Structures are given as structure tokens and as C-alpha cells.
């Protein structure tokens, strides 16, 4: 890992970003590509905090700016997701080991889910950073169950039982579904940039997935994200000055 470079902390929702900024006493805003990037420090580390925006294209733009403009050394994504895997319940935490775009389909030229010209459908998380993120989640949230495995992304909000079951049948090892992680993983792969992500399960991506998301984020996901990030940064070696 690039220990001396800034660490990017990416939030999926405004409420989560606000919780992070409250912990940054010296944040300074820089606007690039219509996005606000907040430079500052957390737990002795230089960090760049930013809102990812929603969907794969927006996420890819954010990831590219972090790599090219801010020269970050690691990227950590926090947010919410719909649970897919058996035993993955609302309030659980999922740390990604790999990412896949469930709506990528360039067949018959390429196999379904394979990203054209990459010869792969799955992009791994950085193993060391993901392990640190798992440990941070378990340390910060002893009351929560922490899972790790495949997280899938697509440009649609999965909110019906029929959609969820179709994804479960097609990708039985998928633990959670969201809309940005696989795009971040692909861009970070291109830049050889360590990437890891943690998601709090807000629903089961089924017909009941229409609850009060903002209330869930305020009361559960945002505090979870802040606690995990704090524990992660506390445990990572401080850069040498």
C-alpha cells in the first residue's frame, strides 16, 4: 500500500459523508468535476472524503478524479446495500472480497458478466485492505454480524422479490447488491490502486425494500460507517514524516 499518500474515504449517501466530516477538524473543500472533495485528517492520516454519487458512471468519475487529481494511495468505500446471501440480514455488515457488474452483458461476443477486453467478470478487493476493514468492523461493531465475499453492482435499484431471486439463482455466492462498487473496483484496477468496501445491509432487495432509507442511514448506517472508518484508521500504520 502507498502509506504516505492520502486515503480516500468514499461515502454513498450525504448523511454518511456528514458524519465523516464531523470527525475531520481541518477539512478543506475542493470542487472538481462538479464534486466536493474534502481534504483533511482523521486519526493521524491525510484523507480525502467525497460523495460517490449514484450509479456506475458517476462512481467511475469519482474514482478517476481520486486517482488522477488527488493521487490517493488507497480507497475505502462505505455505504448501504441490499442483502442477497442466505443469512445476510438487515443491520449486518458485508465487506467485499470481489465485485461484479450483474447487468454487464456483451454476449454473445463475450460471456455474460465478463467486462469486454479485461477477460474477467470479477475484480478483487485489495486483500490486505479488505482484511483490515473486516477487523475494523468486528472491533467497532461487536454487536453486528460481519460477512465477507462477493458484492454485485448494477445501474438499477433491486427492490422486488422476483429480481432478488433471479440474481440469487444467477450468482448464488453474491452476498449483497448495490450500484457503485464494481465501477470503483474496475477503475482502481486500472490505476493499480488498493480498494476495499464495506456495506451495511439496509434491506433484503425484495418487495419489502421500500422502507425509510434516510432514517435507517441516520440511525444505523451512518454511525456504523463512522465507527468502522475510525477503527480502520486507528489500526493502520501512521505515515512517517
Image: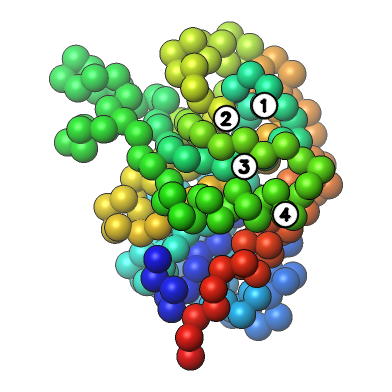
Q: CA distance from mark 4 to mark 3?
A: 16 Å
**Category of crowding for the residue at label 2, using alpha-carbon neighbours closer than 10 angstroms: few (below 14), some (14–19), many (at least 20):** many
Report the residue at 54% width, 73% height from top.
Answer: 237
Contact flag, marks 2 and 4 (Cβ < 8 Å)? no
Q: Is residue 159 visible?
A: no
- Indicate whether 201 appears above or below 65: above
Label whose residue precedes the other's in the sequence (1 or 3)? 1
The residue under label 2 is 176
Quadrant location of the N terminus? Answer: bottom left
Task: Please state which of residues 133 and 13 is positioned toward the viewer in this rendering.
Answer: 133
Q: CA distance from mark 1 to mark 3?
A: 11 Å
**Category of crowding for the residue at label 1, using alpha-carbon neighbours closer than 10 angstroms: few (below 14), some (14–19), many (at least 20):** many
Q: Nearer the viewer, mark 2 or mark 1?
A: 1
**Category of crowding for the residue at label 3, using alpha-carbon neighbours closer than 10 angstroms: few (below 14), some (14–19), many (at least 20):** many
The residue under label 4 is 139
The residue under label 1 is 88
Q: How many marks?
A: 4
**Category of crowding for the residue at label 4, using alpha-carbon neighbours closer than 10 angstroms: few (below 14), some (14–19), many (at least 20):** some
Mark 4 lies on a secondary structure that is helix
Contact flag, marks 2 and 1 (Cβ < 8 Å)? yes
Q: Is residue 166 visible?
A: yes
Q: Is residue 50 left or right of residue 72?
A: right
- Indicate whether 130 appears above or below 115: below
Contact flag, marks 2 and 3 (Cβ < 8 Å)? yes
Residue 199, labelled with which disc?
3
Label whose residue precedes the other's in the sequence (2 or 3)? 2
Label whose residue precedes the other's in the sequence (4 or 3)? 4
Amino acid at each position: 500500500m502507498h502509506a504516505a499518500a492520502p486515503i480516500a474515504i468514499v461515502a454513498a449517501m450525504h448523511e454518511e459523508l456528514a458524519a465523516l466530516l464531523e470527525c475531520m477538524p481541518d477539512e478543506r473543500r475542493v470542487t472538481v468535476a462538479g464534486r466536493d472533495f474534502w481534504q483533511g485528517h482523521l486519526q493521524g492520516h491525510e484523507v480525502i472524503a467525497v460523495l460517490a454519487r449514484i450509479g456506475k458512471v458517476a462512481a467511475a468519475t469519482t474514482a478517476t478524479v481520486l486517482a488522477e487529481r488527488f493521487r490517493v494511495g488507497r480507497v475505502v468505500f462505505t455505504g448501504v446495500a441490499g442483502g442477497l446471501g442466505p443469512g445476510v440480514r438487515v443491520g449486518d455488515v458485508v465487506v467485499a472480497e470481489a465485485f461484479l457488474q450483474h447487468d454487464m452483458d456483451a454476449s454473445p461476443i463475450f460471456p455474460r458478466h465478463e467486462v469486454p477486453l479485461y477477460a474477467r467478470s470479477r475484480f478483487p478487493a485489495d486483500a490486505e485492505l479488505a482484511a483490515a476493514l473486516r477487523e475494523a468492523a468486528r472491533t467497532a461493531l461487536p454487536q453486528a454480524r460481519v460477512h465477507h465475499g462477493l458484492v454485485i453492482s448494477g445501474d438499477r435499484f433491486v427492490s422486488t422479490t422476483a429480481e432478488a431471486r433471479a440474481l440469487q439463482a444467477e450468482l448464488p455466492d453474491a452476498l449483497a447488491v448495490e450500484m457503485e462498487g464494481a465501477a470503483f473496483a474496475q477503475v482502481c484496477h486500472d490505476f493499480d490502486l488498493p480498494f476495499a468496501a464495506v456495506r451495511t445491509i439496509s434491506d433484503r432487495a425484495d418487495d419489502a425494500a421500500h422502507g425509510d432509507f434516510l432514517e435507517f442511514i441516520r440511525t444505523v448506517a451512518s454511525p456504523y460507517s463512522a465507527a468502522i472508518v475510525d477503527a480502520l484508521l486507528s489500526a493502520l500504520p501512521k505515515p512517517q514524516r
